[in-house]
Amino acid sequence: MGLSSELLIVAAFIFFFAAFIHGSIGFGFPMVATPLLALVTDIHTAIILTLIPTLLVNLASIVSEGNILHALRCHLPLALLAMAGSAIGTLALIFTNSHVFEALLGLVIIAYLLSERIKIDLSWVCIYPRLSKIFFGISAGILGGLTNVMAPILIIYSLESKHTKSEIIQASNFSFMFGKTVQLVLFSIYGKYNLSEISTSLIMLVVVSLALYIGIKIKNNINVNTYKRVLRIFLSVLAMTLIIKVVYIQA
């Protein structure tokens, strides 16, 4: 059963908004699109609808930083670990109650918003680089498979590993792209999406491409700090709305 015409219009606005944000500040597409879509559908449908557009956003972000082959060689181990974790998270999403993961998504967004204020000693990341890569790679993948959001874990890992801005962008986008690929395969194997959902996802590529282009064009003409502040407030409200929605459903 496909989305109604009203939901298609709402989805188009959500995709445009999320892609515009991503283009203008360099991050945010899945973190904005997934919870908004989950408010009007459910997290399972939200993840399916964002699968293909997210791959486009990831690829655009990787290409924009250049040196693609070198970046792939550097970040392939982390991306493969994220892929393995994403397989675990996706299987859990397929076979368990998705409403629980809507609440988890809300909590993940809150944790991301608080991450700059919470100081945790993670000096072991540099002391044990291989162990930390395995831990953060698989953890990010599992979280991405369950909620479509890997950013908080990957950003913490990259910052503690002293990565450059370009390395952070490419490592996270490669990881997310590999995770989305295995997710697409698993959804196909278990028949968890229909032709209507994939068609909608493909159609949204037009909306996403246009919004990305506009966002990138105005990137240098906006006050990024103010913009990020507004986005953080928006994400806070969105996260609390998701949690309230789940509590209401469970009640």
Image: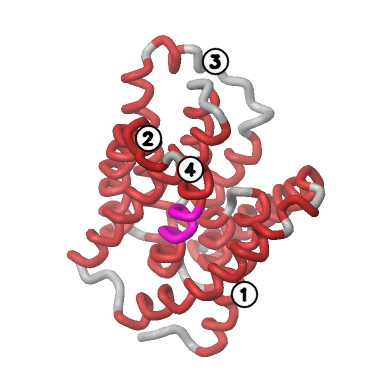
Residue 104 appears anywhere in the view: no
- Marks 4 and 3: which is nearer the front? 4
Residue 199 location, quadrant: bottom left
- Mark number, residue 220: none
What colouring does the structure picture have? secondary structure
Identify residue for label 4: 66
Type of residue at label 1? Phe
Give the magenta part as a residue range.
54-60
Q: Would you call the spot at circle 4 few (<14 residues within 10 Å), some (14-19), or many (20 or more)?
A: few
Type of residue at label 3? Asp
The residue tagged with tag 4: helix, strand or loop? loop
Determine the CA span between mark 1 and mark 3: 40 Å
- The residue lying at 29 percent from left, 61 percent from top is 184
Identify residue for label 1: 13
Type of residue at label 4? Gly
Determine the CA span between mark 4 and mark 3: 33 Å
Identify residue for label 3: 121
Quarter of the N terminus within the rendering: bottom left
